[in-house]
Image (cartoon, rainbow, N blue to C red):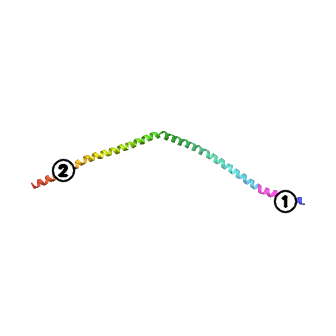
Amino acid sequence: MLVSLAALVAALGIVILVAVLVPAINEMKKTSSALREFIVNTESSLHPMLGELRKTLTDVRELADAAAARRDDITTIMSALGDTGQSVHRLNGIIEGAVQVVEKPVMYWAGFKAAAQNILGNFTKRG
């Protein structure tokens, strides 16, 4: 009797174990199938994107290499522009000085002429 009770408990345990494990195993199969499908979809969409990324990186490297090769030219141009700016500034100072040199005598001459006309006008009025 004790053996049959132990066999009954063992059989009941196996039935409960099977009743729990079968749905769990089915759920794991569904999950692994969905995961496999997700990985395949992700891989198929990543391959073109990675190809474009590699192409973009190659283009960026080429641009960086071209810019590095032209760095000396750009430095020369910037230096020439700086020298040109300094020359224009100096020329502006020279022209400003020349205008002041010409401007002062012209102002004195205009003042002298106005004074002479005023004096001559007063002299002719008094007659």
Is residue 114 shown left or right of residue 94? left
Q: Residue at x 59, y 44 (%)?
A: 50
Quadrant housing the N terminus: bottom right
Residue 71's spot in the image, x, y percent?
A: 47, 40
Going by the numbered disc 1, the residue's amino acid type is Val
Label 1 packing within 10 angstroms: few (<14), some (14-19), many (20+): few
* Residue annotated with mark 1: 9
Label 2 Cα crowd, 10 Å radius (few <14 / some 14-19 / many 20+): few
From the top left corner, tell me how far across and down residue 24 is, in percent: 74, 55
Q: Helix, strand or loop at disc 2?
A: helix
In this rendered view, identify the residue nearer to me: 95 or 67: 95
Identify the image quadrant of the C terminus: bottom left
- The part of the chain drawn in magenta is 12-21
Residue 87: x, y in percent? 35, 43
Q: Is residue 123 left or right of residue 100?
A: left
Residue beneath label 2, please? Answer: 112
The answer to if 18 sits in the magenta stretch is yes
- Give the secondary structure at mark 1: helix
Q: Give the residue displayed 68% in from the left and 50% down from the top.
A: 35
Q: Amino acid at mark 2?
A: Phe
Tell me which residue sits at (14%, 53%) in the image: 119
Residue 42 in magenta stretch: no
Q: Tell me if 44 is positioned left or right of 126 in this view.
A: right
